[in-house]
Amino acid sequence: MEDPTPFTVAQPRPSDWADLARIHVQAWRETYSSLLPARFFGDEALRKREDMWRSSLSHPDAAERIRVARVDGRPVGFAIHGPSRDTPPVRPLELFTLYVLAAHHGTGAGQALLDSAIGDAPASLWVAEENPRARRFYARNGFARDGAHRVEDDLEDLAEVRLVR
């Protein structure tokens, strides 16, 4: 039987840096345009993301912690995971980020990225408090608020809550 999945998930290629930067900025625009000023989605933001992704993908050990969803060979989303950055860690594993372009929401790409990145392992993540779509997605995957809350000064005081499973 042929696989009905319209996407694949794998580690990134070094040449993916420009596509991943574009997705990063576009996904932020689609997700946070009502929460953050336009400067987070403009040309300067794109240049910063290009530098970040070019650097990240030049290190094979970093690329091992990244998963990319592709449709017809073109990246449409990504997830990054690794050891918890919380002090002290509430779980050994953290999902740092998961973004899928809005045009691919509901296709299963986000679920496949989550499954590939962390599977069903105990993990933590931080999510914008005012991102109900993401919070519902993570709740369906067994994540719940643990009471931790933070405000990101460099992100215009964006409030985040920690989820754990």
Image (tube, rainbow, N blue to C red):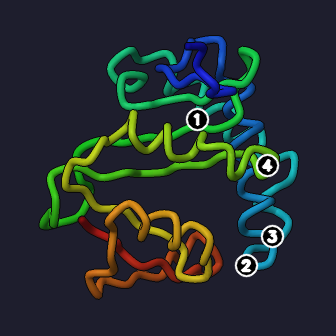
Q: Which mark is residue 52?
A: 1
Residue 19 figure quarter: top right
Q: Which mark is residue 144?
A: none
Gap between marks 1 and 3 measured at Cα: 21 Å
Q: Identify which amino acid the numbered label 3 is placed on.
A: Ser
Gap between marks 1 and 4 measured at Cα: 15 Å
**Is 43 placed above or below 18 here?**
below
Badge 2 crowding class, 10 Å Cα cut-off, few under 14, some 14 to 19, many 20 or more, is some
| Count of marks overlaid on the render | 4
Q: Identify which amino acid the numbered label 4 is placed on.
A: Gln
**Is 10 placed above or below 147 here?**
above
Label whose residue precedes the other's in the sequence (1 or 3): 3
Badge 4 crowding class, 10 Å Cα cut-off, few under 14, some 14 to 19, many 20 or more, is many
Q: Spot the residue most to the front.
A: 1
Mark 1–mark 4 contact, CB under 8 Å?
no
Residue at the image point whose x is 37% and y is 51% from the top: 95
Q: Which mark is residue 26?
A: 4
Mark 2–mark 4 contact, CB under 8 Å?
no
Mark 3–mark 2 contact, CB under 8 Å?
yes
SS assignment at label 2: loop
Image side of residue 15 versus residue 30, left or right = left
Label whose residue precedes the other's in the sequence (3 or 4): 4
Residue at the image point whose x is 56% and y is 66% from the top: 134
Q: Nearer the viewer, residue 131 or 52?
A: 131
